[in-house]
Image: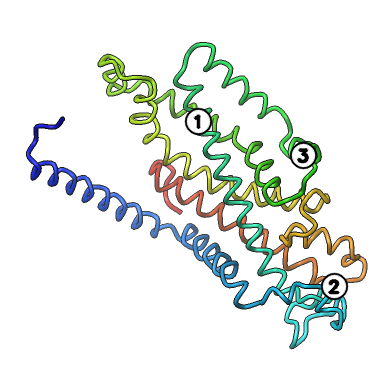
Amino acid sequence: MSTEPPSVMLSSRAAARARRGAALRRFARSYAAHRSGMAGLVILGLFALIALLAPVLFPADMLDITKTVQNETLEPPSGEFWLGTDEGGRSILAVLAWAARASLTVGVAASAISMVLGTLVGIGSGHYRGLLGSLLQRLTDWFLVIPFIPLVVVLAAVLGQRGLGTIVLVLGVTSWPGTARLVRAQTLSVEGRPYLERAKALGGSDWHQMVRHVLPNVMPLVLANTTLTVALVILSETTLAFLGLGDPYLDSWGTMLDKANGAGAASTGAWWYLLPPGICVILVVLAFTLIGRALESVLDPRLGRD
């Protein structure tokens, strides 16, 4: 039990909060100085806003094919339908906004799974020197040598169910090896620092060393890498959907491209069906990439500033 007076404990907590606040403000100022990072943040913010407001801007009835049978199919852009209609007579603009919800959800959720798995495996393989560390390293190497897209396709086909949860799970459990390798390298660097040697000498447990000393030092790297992983996951979901392994009842940018291809949009010249989802994928991937690069530059000043 602490013997310090309550006033001392409160003042130390206040000082810790003040330090965290100052560090956060410094980080915000440094990030704001990166024009490309801010551009990526603005693009991502716009797409997130569209996804959140989709039910308000475009009621769910606009996606019900039974209620759009009176509309012309594959109609080019007009005053009523700004981006034209799909093969079911639905407004492509409405489908695009609702698809943003699914694509962004898959990207963020699968990347969160990847971040957790990659961090756990990376820290474990870097901290433990015996059989456990070797097994974790071999597991990471095994996932790395297998081509990513074929592995995702095989897992998606084996699981069978094409729901949103299955897609998130498949992409999450196959995209963590890169994070694990980065975390392991950083863990090995942290393991040789004097304060960690002191913690070992004082009898600190493995859990204490990994959670209190290693994890805080690797988290900036993990967060920066996760933004890049989101971009990879969104591209992978688009690929799965285009190959017919996505959820056919879920509107995402990938399923839009798959349905456009199946409806013969390329052969009939219906560019308004193919281009919008493709451009959205490119812009969101670009946004996450710009954010990730800016975070890397802020967290590692040696990379310089754009």
**How would you rate the neighbour count of disc 3 (Cα within 10 Å): few for under 14, some for 14-19, many for 20 or more?**
few
Specify the label residue 120 is tagged with.
1
| Side (left or right) of 302 relative to 281 | left
Height in image: 23 above or below 73? above
The image shows residue 28, relative to residue 79, as above or below, that is above
Circles 3, 2 touching at the beta carbon (< 8 Å): no
Give coordinates of residue 64: x percent, y percent: 77, 73
Q: Quadrant of residue 229?
A: top right
User: Mark on residue 159?
Assistant: 3
Q: Amino acid at mark 1?
A: Leu
Of residues 66 and 190, the one drawn nearer to the viewer in this rendering: 66
Quarter residue 280 falls in: bottom right
Residue in front for this viewpoint, 98 or 43: 98
Tell me if 178 is positioned left or right of 206 in this view: right
Please tell me how crowded label 1 is: few (under 14), some (14-19), or many (20+) other residues with Cα within 10 Å. some
Tag 2 residue:
88
Indicate the amino acid at tag 2. Answer: Gly
Which amino acid, by three-letter code, is at mark 3? Leu
What distance separates the C-alpha of mark 3 from that of mark 2?
29 Å
Residue lying at the far bottom of the rendered structure:
79
Q: Nearer the viewer, residue 98 or 282?
A: 98
5 sits to left or right of 286: left
